[in-house]
Image (cartoon, rainbow, N blue to C red):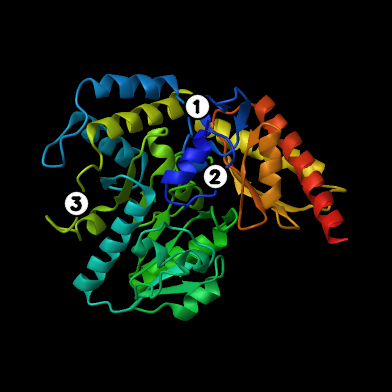
Amino acid sequence: MKTLHEIDNEYHFKTYKRYPVTLTRGEGSRVWDTDGNEYIDALAGIAVNNVGHCHPKVVEAIRDQVGTLIHTSNFFTTEPQVELAQKLVDLSNHDRVFFCNSGTEAVEGAIKIAKRYANKTGKKGNIIYMSGAFHGRSLGALAISQKKYQDGFEPMLPGFIEVPFNDIKAVEEQMNDDTVAVILEPIQGEGGVHVATQEYITELSSLCMEHKALLIFDEIQCGIGRSGTFFAYEQYGIVPDIVTMAKGLGGGFPIGAFIATEDVANIIEYGKHGTTFGGNPLASRAGLATIDAIFDEKLIQKAEENGQWLRERIRMEMPGEPGITEVRGRGLMNGVQLGFSGAGVALRMLKKGVIANVTGSNVVRLVPALNITRNELDIVVDVMMESIREELEAQKEESS
């Protein structure tokens, strides 16, 4: 009899390099596969399950809403969407929100606002984006992402220019009064968990104000409490014109959004942007329950405290460990830089009962649920260190 993994390989597009397990159940920071094996999930669906798998409040909200009203289209107002919109505005320094279904849709919406802004103001310049960025896989988002994701889909959409991340002089060289916008992840995810410095963000914000360019923060991976504040921008003392979000917003249920200040939101008039499914009652209830769980259980504070603890715990292991060169991150969005190709590390961790992944070819990314326990994090570090040693030794033997 064929396994589910083999059947999947027959029918699904071959766009994913899946791990060789089939998951069946999840609870908190634990998941189980078809063979009954238990894993600690330090990937959380790629920074999606911020409140863990199947959080009771999220499950209850979804079950209740499924039996009440699932979808209406945005021709109608619904109570869950209005409540979620108000909550996101109240939690931010912004005035309006637009709901969609995913991170890439949120980025597309932000780009669309920037383009509309350019048309209204007569700007004919570029949108500046950062090296190492990943903003999504649709054509607009792809045009402002790493080259490796663009490969084979050229020509890219025009109107975008790349500069090095955390390099303010590079931005200054490209920026002028015709520049439309600057978009960046304050903490790069797929690029290897690189954190924007305070000085960089402060000067970048000033440059955008000087040249009347929109500042767009992509917080799809680092937002919704993961970085140690609800929005990552709060840590920098500035207010972006637009902030995109998705991943952690729905507790595992698909939902995306972007928020903007009033003057920026007013750039898009009636009929210039829309969505069929975005912010439907079911997705909005999931979002409300997720946010309630984050604040009721003080998960933002836990993310900050456990993130600091995790980085120090790993640094304690680093002396005498030639495989690790750096640990970086904020809150519970952390990267462990390896001095060698690390693809095999994640597979070794999986065999030992811990789910993580390697991004940028040599950075172990740890983005667990915000309610993961210290004991579970301790196990994650022990398994990771053991797997790094084994993989490094295996590669040395292979090359000798």
Q: Is residue 376 left or right of residue 199?
A: right
At numbered mark 3, what does the secondary structure look like: helix, strand or loop? loop
Q: Residue placed at 71% from the left, 57% from the top? A: 341
Q: Amino acid at mark 2?
A: Arg
Instruction: Decide if residue 298 is in sight here.
Output: no
Q: Residue at x 14, y 36 (%)?
A: 77
Which numbered dot is residue 24?
1
Q: Secondary structure at mark 2?
A: loop
| Lower position in the chain sequence, tag 3 or tag 1 | 1
Can residue 391 be seen in the rendering of this structure? yes
Amino acid found under the numbered disc labelled 1: Thr
Q: Left of 280 or right of it: where is 354?
A: right
Task: Read off the residue under disc 3.
Answer: 274
Q: Which mark is residue 156?
A: none
Element class at badge 1: strand
Number of residues whose C-alpha sits closer than 10 Å to that of mark 3, classed few (under 14), some (14–19) or many (20 or more): few
Residue at (42, 42) in percent of width and height:
247
Q: How far from the left and from the top, in percent, is residue 124?
A: 28, 79
Foreground mark, 2 or 3, reads 2
Q: Up-down: is 228 above or below 299?
A: below
Q: Earlier in the sequence, mark 2 or mark 3?
A: 2
Q: Quadrant of residue 174?
A: bottom left
- Circle 2 is placed at which residue position? 18
